[in-house]
Image: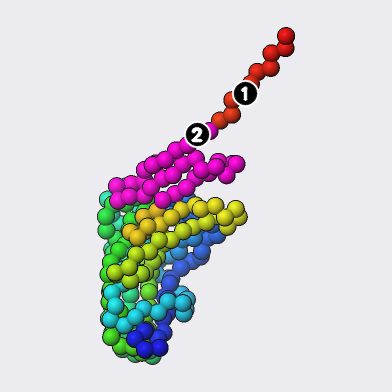
Amino acid sequence: MKNQITIILLLISFVSYAQDFRKERLPDDNVVILPPNPSEIVSCSSFYPLVSKDYIVSAWVKEEAVNVPTYSNNVYLQIEFTTNNGSQQISLDQFYVSGKIIDGWQRIIGKFTAPTVDESQMKIELVNDNTSKNAYFDDVRIFPYNGTQKSFVYDENNQRLMAELDENNYATFYEYDLEGGLVRVKKETEKGVYTIQETRTGTTKKENNDD
């Protein structure tokens, strides 16, 4: 198709995918887990960036490190465009963490431009150059620079809305009681996670007076 990158390769290095949605970005579910220096390729044919257009890429990263102000540049996201046969590189962009670590996770965000060459392929690589520790990637997203994007996460068992990701890839978390009533809403911001709504309900017990 004219004016569109014709072949896309999603290059992801990972150990495994977990099964359920994360709970406030815990590294246990729906998270790509990278051991030191892994390599595996997964093809993707559902996303075709238009040539010469700008895009925003973002993701969340967690390293196995504690009490650090920021994660290292050994963990990053890389986008490479090459000719269709992969023999010639057209462009290469690398994106690193920035901002504060929020509940153990730090955001990657940046802008890239699709090349003017129609017949090219795109590789998205999640990189862990650490020699002895795992890294975790979550919520990798790409959308047009002049656009906006929201993502919604539902519980696969009861279909309840569990989280909503805004255009900055910050999450709003929804918590429910055993009866399915919404009891708490938490908002992820650049300063941390805050409770913005909390609801408590109860049933008044009526005493029986025997006269």
Q: Identify which amino acid the numbered label 1 is placed on.
A: Lys
Report the residue marked by disc 1.
205
Q: Is residue 22 above or below residue 9?
A: above
In the image, residue 23 above or below residue 199: below
Looking at the rendered structure, the number of numbered marks drawn on it comes to 2
Numbered mark located on residue 200 in the image: 2
Q: Are marks 2 and 1 in contact (CB under 8 Å)?
A: no
Q: Position of residue 130 (x, y in %)?
A: 35, 64
Task: For the N terminus, give its image quadrant.
Answer: bottom left
First in sequence, mark 2 or 1: give its number: 2
Point out the residue furthest to the right here: 211
Asked where in the image residue 149 lies, by quadrant, the reply is bottom left
Q: Residue at x 60, y 53 (%)?
A: 158
* Quarter location, residue 159: bottom right
Q: Residue furthest top?
A: 211
Residue 146 found in image quarter = bottom left
Q: Position of residue 145 (x, y in %)?
A: 29, 70
Residue with the most extreme front position? 211
Label the magenta part by its dominant secondary structure.
strand
Point 34% across, 80% down: residue: 50
The magenta segment: 172-201
Mark 2 is on which residue type? Arg
Residue 3 is labelled as none
Task: Rate crowding at label 1 as few (under 14), some (14 to 19) or many (20 or more) other CA atoms within 10 Å.
Answer: few
On-image quarter of the C terminus: top right
C-alpha separation, residue under disc 2 versus residue under disc 1: 16 Å
The reply to whether residue 107 is visible in this rendering is: yes
